[in-house]
Amino acid sequence: MPFFLLLLGIVEAAKPAYVFPFVILTMMIDSKQCPCTSGAPYALCCGPLLSGQTPTATAEALMRSRYTAYVERNISYLLRTWHPSTRPSVLDPATIPNWCGLQIVRTERGRKDDDEGFVEFVATALVRNTLCTLHEVSRFVREAGEWLYVSGDMLEDGEPAEIRAGKTGRNAPCPCGSGKKFKKCCGR
């Protein structure tokens, strides 16, 4: 018997009938973690933002959703959330590296009642078996109730760290800092 049916029987016996569909929905949602490393399920984190169902509430939420859009190569979302004064006319998905890690270092302003915010982050990508990092402070503004990315200042030169089969095995911890095994993270 599949696990979810077994669990379903346990939940049905222990809870009122109206809770049952919610439990199954929660199990389905929890199956895919959001790439933004918030720890939340994608369907409750960046998914509604990327689909346009929900506006971003803070600059950090926009930063995380844009990172997820880069992971998914969602060009329309990236352009839609880029301030018109700095937005490129096109983005080529072929030039986007394979992003595999995000760490938010700090945020400054950028809350629900602010009109400007800054998010410092370190993002990790795997490019031709080379692990590269981008350490940046991004500037965001809120116009007409919507947060938009304006620009970013790189804090380090992002020198890549070479990944070799002998140094980073598939079962070794991923060098991006996610805490996952390399084969389940950047080594995919």
Image (spheres, rainbow, N blue to C red):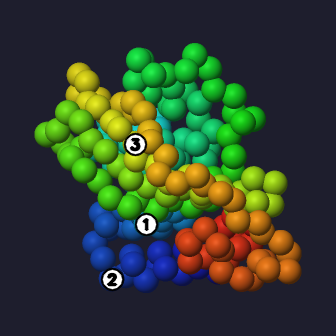
Which is nearer the N-term, disc 3 or disc 2? 2
Name above or below for residue 150 compared with residue 27: above
Name above or below for residue 133 compared with residue 67: below
Q: CA distance from mark 2 to mark 1?
A: 28 Å
Q: Give the residue displayed 63% in from the left and 39% down from the top.
A: 73
> Which circle marks residue 138 in the picture?
3
The residue under label 1 is which amino acid type? Gly
Task: Classify the position of the N terminus by image quarter.
Answer: bottom right
Q: Give the residue displayed 24% in from the left and 36% down from the top.
A: 116
> Dot 2 surroundings within 10 Å: few (below 14), some, or many (20 or more)?
few
- Do labels 3 and 1 touch, CB within 8 Å? no
Viewer-nearest residue: 132 or 91: 132
Which is nearer the N-term, disc 3 or disc 1? 1
Label 1 residue SS:
loop
> Which circle marks residue 21 in the picture?
none
> Which circle marks residue 14 in the picture?
2
Viewer-nearest residue: 188 or 105: 105
Q: CA distance from mark 3 to mark 1?
A: 22 Å
Q: Which picture quadrant has residue 164?
A: bottom right
Provide residue 154's location: percent of width, then percent of height: 49, 46
Name above or below for residue 161 compared with residue 114: below
Q: CA distance from mark 3 to mark 2?
A: 48 Å
Tag 1 residue: 39
The residue under label 3 is which amino acid type? Ser
Q: Give the residue displayed 26% in from the left and 30% down from the top.
A: 142
- Do labels 3 and 2 touch, CB within 8 Å? no
Q: Which picture quadrant has residue 4?
A: bottom right
Q: Indicate left or right for 30 with 60 as reference.
A: right
Provide residue 66's location: percent of width, then percent of height: 48, 42
Residue 8 visible in this rendered orientation of the protein: yes
